[in-house]
Image (spheres, rainbow, N blue to C red):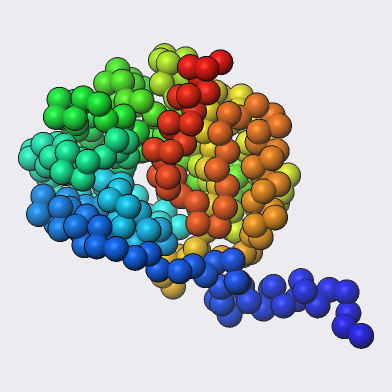
Amino acid sequence: MLPANTEEQNHEAVVRKGRFPSWLHRKLPKGNALLQTSKIVSKNRLHTVCEEAKCPNLLECWSAKTATFLAMGKACTRNCGFCDIDFDKAPNPLDPKEPENIAESVKELGLKHVVITMVARDDRDDGGSHHLVKIIEAVKDQCPDVTIEVLTSDFQGKWEDIDRVIDAKPDIFNYNTETVRRLTPRVRHKATYVRTLELLSRVKERSNIFVKSGLMVGLGETEEEVFETLRDLKNVGCSIVTIGQYLQANIRKLLVKDFITPEQFLKYEQYGKSIGIQEMYCGPFVRSSYNAGQFFQKLSQEVHSG
């Protein structure tokens, strides 16, 4: 007879050997939209977080003619323990053509909802906030019916830079918590848990923009720590929270401590909704911008019908 803890021991062995459990295997999408998306992005000399962060959803999203644009270059001035985006203390200057190029790509792809994220540009006095505003304005000008979601840095806590982006009126302001309070110093380079909550709270207080945040699990957090984080995000006004499995991008990044089961993701989703978070999106492959348009549309319909 097998001992009672055999399943747990097998799970730990899978994590140690880097083998993926069955729920982390998926079929490749079909169709030629993948190639079309790649051509449009390459033609306009743009970067996507899909490529730079090695997102596991790239094939699926590009096949659906969606992409998350990575603004301000592909090198970040921070070197977080989880992220595979290139690190550079002095990255290349900003491309003045980037706002128009992103707007043109949004138009060519026929997007209804666009997600624009950015590398941290701590080398710039304004953290890149003026440039991000120009991108928002360019998309609004060329594609007035497109809804815009921004996924920003914390601009080192400089409120004037954060306010500048808020005043540009994107439809969703997303800033990721990434992990629980205890693990934040190890997982993130400069960002702090408290400043994250302060930033999200400021967006909520100064606007009617939907506030969104996300975190990764599998880094050694406990269930109660995730519950605590969800309560904190609810208290600062988050309407949308995403939770996905952390996957180690390369050997220099933080190790995966646990592969979280679909049942546990469902438990997190149910808990978040039970405390009043309007939209919870939880699952092994969930990322901040994954199916973002669908969730924005659902949230908007709920608000208008309510």
Q: Is residue 146 left or right of residue 195?
A: left
Above or below: residue 56 compared with residue 132:
below
In front here: 199 or 148?
A: 148
In front here: 154 or 90?
A: 154
Q: Is residue 202 left or right of residue 159?
A: right
Instruction: Tell me what residue is drawn at x 64 percent, y 42 percent.
Output: 269
Quadrant location of the C terminus? top right
Evaluate whether residue 85 shows in this view: no
Name the spot of residue 55 as percent of width and height, x first.
39, 59
Name the spot of residue 259 as percent of width and height, x first.
62, 64
Evaluate whether residue 217 shows in this view: yes
Q: Is residue 245 left or right of residue 103?
A: right
In front here: 139 or 175?
A: 139
Furthest residue to the bottom? 1
Furthest residue to the front? 31
Instruction: Tell me what residue is drawn at x 15 percent, y 43 percent.
Output: 108
Above or below: residue 301 compared with residue 191:
above
Furthest residue to the right? 1
In front here: 184 or 268?
A: 268
